[in-house]
Image: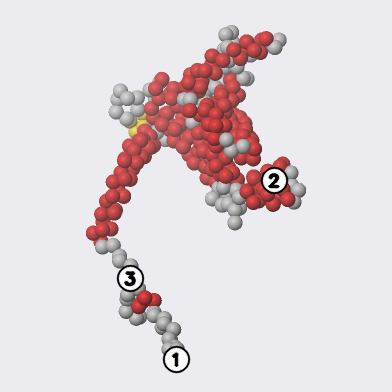
């Protein structure tokens, strides 16, 4: 009995297996110019609302403000070109420099306390619990507007009727005029804004901590590293880019403080809380010196731009230690 031997099936070229002839290459169909034009129009339609808002509410007011900074303008008469007169006046204005000093004091207190507190909250949320409920509770004060937060704390810290001073008095300590004393006013306003913003800042840092691989902490624990050592050797170096961006954002926001001052102290007592934004507002809408107010706004823009560039370079915000 003879068994018929069958030869193994021959292997076809990839082109033959897919139905194409031998030696032919599959070609991806390129979109036609008309299709590219249609995609461009669709993209422009989606971008247009945001671009319109950018031009109307940011670019045009900025350019208009720069122009007005070289003029004398009070809304009642046409703008009169005065060149650098507003900037010369600003350099010789003691109230401007005092307002800038008050603003810097506020920024240093606000940024220092807020950054440390937010970092501590973020690390605790990351290392001890992943509860979404706790993150929501931490974020709750940020959902309140600056005006409402200022009014609430104005009532709490009222010298005569505020519950805060009632507690201090019950402890046998003299009542403190938190918002009516030159020494306490700026630190109090700074801490009010820390209370409102620290939760949001903590969640930004918490998001950065989520990007750090957990294997690094596990390996460090195996090597016997303590939580404190892991914080300085793992958490801080790898969190640096996110922390740098958060610092840039909070510094810019702190220099623009206005709402809390307006509803609590109105720049007082004795200009102790007359921050730069409030002085600009008073010059423009209180004394109708829009040209001079625009010059101070441009000066603030230059200062913030310089600080942002310096922060970006010193903190190496665009680089990461993650391999």
- Rendering quarter of residue 10: bottom left
User: For the residue carrying disc 3, how many other residues have a C-alpha within 10 Å: few (<14), some (14-19), or many (20+)?
Assistant: few
Residue with the mark numbered 3: 27
Q: Which of 99 and 264 is in front in this view?
A: 264
Residue 300: x and y in percent read 48, 34
Task: Please tell me which residue is depicted at 58% across the width and 20% down the height of the picture.
Answer: 185
Q: In this view, does 100 lie to the left or right of 35?
A: right
Using the image, determine if residue 143 lies above or below residue 310: above
Residue furthest to the top in view is 160
Residue 307: x and y in percent read 54, 40
Q: Nearer the viewer, residue 238 or 61?
A: 238
Residue 316, visible in the rendered structure? yes
Task: Please tell me which residue is depicted at 61% across the width and 40% down the height of the picture.
Answer: 126
Mark toward the start of the polypeptide (2 vs 1): 1
Disc 2 to disc 1, how far (Cα)?
77 Å
Q: In this view, does 17 lie to the left or right of 200?
A: left
Circle on res. 67: none
Q: Which SS class for mark 1?
A: loop
Circle on res. 230: 2
Q: Is residue 67 left or right of residue 220?
A: left
Disc 3 to disc 1, how far (Cα)?
49 Å
Which one is in front in this view, the residue at disc 3 or the one at disc 1? 1
Disc 2 to disc 3, how far (Cα)?
53 Å
User: For the residue carrying disc 2, how many other residues have a C-alpha within 10 Å: few (<14), some (14-19), or many (20+)?
Assistant: some
Q: Nearer the viewer, residue 73 or 54?
A: 54
Residue with the mark numbered 1: 2
Using the image, determine if residue 152 lies above or below residue 68: above
Task: Please tell me which residue is depicted at 71% across the width and 50% down the height of the picture.
Answer: 220
């Amino acid at each position: 009995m003879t068994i018929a031997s069958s030869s193994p099936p021959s292997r076809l070229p990839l082109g033959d297996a897919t139905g194409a002839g031998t030696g032919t290459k599959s070609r991806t169909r390129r979109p036609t110019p008309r299709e590219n034009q249609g995609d461009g129009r669709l993209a422009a339609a989606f971008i247009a609302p945001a671009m319109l808002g950018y031009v109307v509410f940011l670019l045009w007011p900025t350019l208009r403000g720069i122009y007005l900074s070289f003029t004398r303008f009070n809304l009642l008469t046409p703008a009169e070109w005065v060149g650098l007169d507003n900037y010369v006046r600003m350099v010789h204005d003691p109230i401007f420099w005092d307002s800038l000093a008050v603003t810097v004091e506020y920024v240093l207190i606000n940024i220092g306390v807020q950054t440390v507190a937010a970092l501590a909250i973020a690390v605790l949320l990351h290392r001890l619990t992943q509860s979404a409920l706790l993150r929501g509770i931490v974020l709750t004060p940020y959902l309140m507007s600056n005006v409402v937060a200022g009014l609430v704390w104005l009532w709490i810290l009222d010298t005569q009727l505020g519950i805060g001073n009632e507690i201090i008095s019950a402890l046998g300590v003299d009542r403190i005029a938190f918002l009516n004393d030159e020494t306490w006013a700026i630190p109090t306003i700074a801490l009010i804004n820390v209370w409102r913003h620290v939760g949001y800042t903590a969640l930004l840092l918490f998001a950065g901590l989520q990007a750090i691989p957990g294997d690094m902490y596990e390996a460090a624990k195996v090597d016997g590293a303590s939580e404190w050592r892991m914080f300085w050797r793992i958490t801080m170096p790898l969190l640096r880019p996110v922390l740098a961006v958060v610092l840039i954002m909070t510094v810019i926001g702190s220099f623009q403080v206005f709402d809390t001052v307006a509803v609590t102290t109105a720049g007082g007592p004795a200009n102790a809380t007359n921050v730069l934004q409030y002085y600009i507002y008073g010059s423009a809408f209180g004394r109708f010196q829009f040209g001079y107010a625009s010059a101070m706004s441009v000066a603030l823009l230059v200062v913030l731009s310089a600080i942002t560039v310096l922060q970006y370079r010193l903190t190496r915000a665009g680089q990461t230690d993650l391999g």
